Amino acid sequence: MELDKQRFLDELARLVNIDSVSSEPEGAGKIAAFMKDKYKSLGWLVEEVSLAPSIGPCLRIVNREAEKYDVLLLAHMDTVFPLGTAAKRPFRIEGNRAYGPGVIDCKAGLLSGFYALANLQERGALADAAVCVFLNSDHEGISSRYSAAYSTNLARKSRYVLALEAGRANGNLVYKRKGIARYHINIKGVAAHAGVDYQTGRNAVEELAHWIIALQAATDLSKETTVNVGKVWGGTGISAVPGQAGAAVDVRYYDAAESERVAGLMRSLQAHPHVEGTLAEVEGGITRPPMLPTEKTMALCRSIDDIGQEIGVEFGWMASGGGSDGSFAAAAGTPTIDGLGPVGGGAHSENEYLEIDTIIPRYELLCRIIQHIICIK
């Protein structure tokens, strides 16, 4: 089955024009139903996996049941965009680019993975292979909270994992990603009238300010560790000593010791408040481990370089600070490559775009990579 680019674009338009925000299961359910029908048309076994009522169904798809898989393909069916986004800015094409919510993150990847496997099956390349595809509905915003354990278990049963997130805007593939930790800090103080009872108050915002300065200072760019206090709140009015304050904190890291260093700093701040009479509560932790390459990962990278040169597809390799379900697979010890979807950029923004002329070359690259993996025994 050679790839019909116009058919691909028509189906992509259909997927993009369905709102599938993670928190609304109906839309992701429609995407799941579409992908289920596509794979069933190949005779593959499709299992709907219901992991939580607040998200759409996830799909485990196999060409045959097996104890071990040669390759596991990962992609997500949800987007970050709220209901109504697709109606406001539906799928459109301008020149060589296609636009729309989720066009590259990750709806083009969903289709690319399907058509690559359909091609390989038609040519008999999967006759002796066991392939699994896992599509989840809780990737965006909630870091695959419900599906992480399930996909990690599939990765442990697989020799290699390919994640179908978009190729980077410069065409690069991804071999390494930072881990992510998220924290919510809540400071409880004592509210009081700023003019009449100032001395009886315990200023939660003042205490939070000490946390903010200490946490921002915990960034260590020499180790590529970043700590970002991205959201703060507190107080009720200018004439009141604020009794409550809070913040949301994002931590990105490669070294697990760095994650523990930042967590230790928060424990120290919690145990030793700067403003007497305030109390801090901290919730959160690691949401995605780092995706770190093994020797087998790097060997696969070199093979992919050879494949790219052979078929004339140009790309490089890069590390990424963004999250991916490939991180769970890599943490399970399975060699993992990411960024294998078509090329694009602007994810999570109104300017998200797909480079149309990369659809077929990246599909051909994916076909060859899967075929190569199947031959590695």
Image: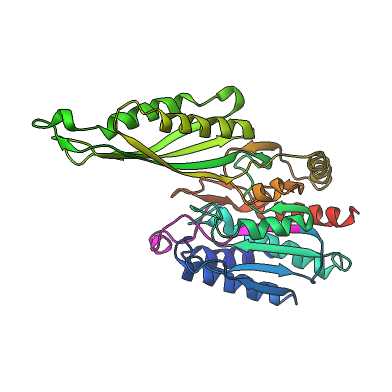
Q: Position of residue 231 (x, y in %)?
A: 37, 39
Task: Assign the C terminus to one quadrant of the image.
Answer: bottom right
Q: Position of residue 100 (x, y in %)?
A: 48, 57
Task: Read off the magenta span.
Answer: 72-94
Is 83 one of the magenta-colored residues? yes
Asked whether 73 or 271 is in front, the reply is 271
Residue at x-position 52% and y-position 68%: 56
Residue at x-position 34% and y-position 37%: 279
> Image quadrant of residue 71?
bottom right
> Would you say 241 lies left or right of 83 here?
left
Residue at x-position 71% and y-position 37%: 316
Residue at x-position 83% and y-position 41%: 299
- In the image, is residue 263 above or below residue 335? above
Asked whether the viewer can see residue 3, the reply is no
Asked whether 175 or 358 is in front, the reply is 175
Q: Position of residue 241 (x, y in %)?
A: 19, 34
Name the residue at the left extreme. 196
> Would you say 232 lies left or right of 218 here?
left
Asked whether the viewer can see residue 76, the reply is yes
